[in-house]
Image (tube, rainbow, N blue to C red):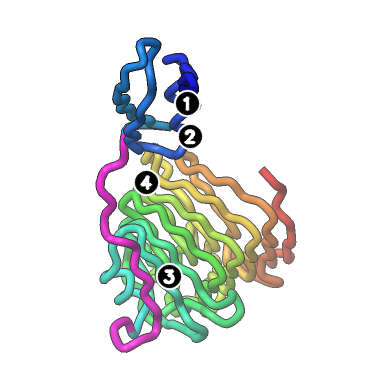
Amino acid sequence: MRPRRHVPHHFSLLALMGFSGRGVTHRLTHTSRTGRLGVLVALIVVGGSAPAAAGAAPTLRVVPSQAYPSIQSAVQASQPGDTIKVLPGVYREQRSVDKSLTITGSGAGVTTIAAPRTLVSGEDGKGSIVEIRNGASVAMSRIGVSGPGAGTCEDDPLEAGIRVLGGAHLDLSFARVTHIRNSPTVACFHSGVGILVGIITDPGSGTAMIRDSEISDYGTKGILILSEGSATISHNIVAGSAQMPADGSTRCSRRARSPTT
């Protein structure tokens, strides 16, 4: 009879089982020195404990559709982890996102969220076209956000194109944020900001990753990160308004490409 080859115990788990993934239980047979047959059960866990049972698969929701005529209706129906696909068109609505979602347009030049005539105040008491809040982590890409707002400095001014606060995170890419100003064009304190992240008095109030996007024709600031917010900004084009009357003065246009960070 051909002798059985002995596999040392310290080698048997890796050599016989291989490296087949996380949280997988292997039932193996090996032969000891005495020739008796034994059973070896091992649990290989890589990077943490064995995963829990998988939940429902993420849902893809298409806007517009019979079920979701607006972006906000799809946001309200979604569960964290879902994806919203927005077809070409102009969607004149405010959007408030308080859950972690992926929102993808059909191109920044053909899918646009436009400011409605009347803005509703958001969590910070001011009006923005898109507000991300409540600790949500939101990825937005291939989509445009556009003003102008119809308010004045005293009456419902447009604070920001995209507002990130309340511990939320924005991942913005291949997007366009433009015409973020009031109409008629006037300089209002803390308004007309393309993308506004964080709150001065609230630590950890908002973070963002902004890349490969264009922010243009804004009233006061293209991207404003308040002291308790943080952001990684790379490969963007930021271009201000050609003329913006403010207290009798004229501000020159500004165009800059943000560095890689």
Query: Circle 2 is placed at which residue position?
Result: 19
Q: Percent x, y for residue 257?
A: 73, 56
Q: In this view, does 246 lie above or below 182?
A: above
Query: Circle 1 is placed at which residue position?
Result: 14
Residue mark closest to the camera, 4 vs 1: 1
Residue 247 visible in rendering: no
Q: What residue type is labelled 1?
A: Leu
Q: What residue type is labelled 3?
A: Ile
Q: What residue occupies the far top of the structure in this picture?
A: 34
Please indicate whether residue 198 sits to the left or right of residue 232 in the image. Answer: left
Residue 50 visible in rendering: yes
Sequence-wise first label, 4 or 1: 1
Residue mark closest to the camera, 3 vs 2: 2
Distance between mark 3 and mark 4 Cα atoms = 18 Å
Distance between mark 1 and mark 3 Cα atoms = 55 Å
Please indicate whether residue 136 sits to the left or right of residue 107 in the image. Answer: left
Q: Give the range drawn in magenta.
A: 50-68
Label annotation for residue 129:
3
Q: Along the line of sight, which residue is nearer the eye, 109 or 10?
A: 10
Distance between mark 2 and mark 4 Cα atoms = 38 Å
Q: Along the line of sight, which residue is nearer the eye, 40 or 144?
A: 40
Q: Along the line of sight, which residue is nearer the eye, 141 or 21?
A: 21
Query: Circle 4 is placed at which residue position?
Result: 167
Q: In this view, does 14 lie above or below 229?
A: above
Residue mark closest to the camera, 1 vs 3: 1
Q: In this view, does 50 lie above or below 9?
A: below
Sequence-wise first label, 2 or 4: 2
Secondary element under disc 3, as helix, strand or loop, is: strand
Label 3 close to label 2 by CB (< 8 Å): no
Residue 53 is covered by the magenta coloring: yes
